[in-house]
Image: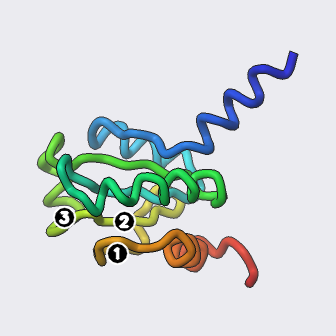
């Protein structure tokens, strides 16, 4: 029956936890556009972004993922992570923009991603 299609859609419509730099590279290379949150355990603002990211994963054409750079220290240097949450927008596997402003509401973050990816004619 059509059970596999909703499962695929469900996976795509959720933020994806990325374990390390290799997982990040695979994730962004498989996506035309992606939004990745760099977070840390115990970060209250990062935790409050969780439902926002869930909504964005369902709303945007871009894929949404999250990674703890402390699990892979070279990421801290590569992406110059100085505070979390840090949001990086990727297009065709390349980082094109970043925001590190604390909590960002869903509408603002969605508009920012769309502006970076050229998605949506508002």
Q: In which quarter of the view is residue 88 placed?
A: bottom left
Question: How many numbered callouts?
Answer: 3
**Dot 3 corresponds to which residue?**
81
Pick the quarter of the image with the C terminus: bottom right
**Residue at position x 36%, y 65% in the image:** 87
**Which disc is residue 79 wearing?**
none
Q: Residues within 10 Å of mark 3 (few under 14, many from 20)?
A: some
Task: Tell me whether circle 2 and circle 1 mark residues in contact (CB < 8 Å).
Answer: yes
Pick the quarter of the image with the N terminus: top right
Precedes in sequence: disc 2 or disc 3: 3
Considering depth in this image, is 122 or 25 the residue closer to the camera? 122
**In the image, residue 77 lies at what x, y percent?**
14, 60
**Residue at position x 29%, y 73% in the image:** 102
**Dot 2 corresponds to which residue?**
87
Precedes in sequence: disc 2 or disc 1: 2
Q: State the separation of the CA atoms marked 1 and 3.
A: 11 Å
Considering depth in this image, is 120 or 22 the residue closer to the camera? 120
């Amino acid at each position: 029956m059509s059970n596999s299609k909703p499962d695929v859609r469900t996976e795509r419509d959720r933020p994806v936890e990325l374990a390390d730099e290799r997982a990040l590279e695979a994730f962004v290379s498989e996506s035309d556009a992606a939004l990745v949150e760099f977070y840390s355990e115990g970060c209250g603002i990062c935790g409050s972004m969780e439902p926002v990211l869930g909504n964005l994963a369902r709303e945007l054409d871009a894929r949404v993922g999250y990674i703890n750079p402390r699990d892979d220290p070279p990421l801290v240097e590569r992406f110059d992570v100085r505070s979390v949450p840090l949001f990086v927008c990727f297009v065709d596997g390349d980082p094109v923009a970043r925001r590190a402003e604390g909590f960002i509401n869903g509408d603002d973050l969605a508009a920012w991603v769309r502006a970076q990816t050229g998605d949506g004619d508002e």
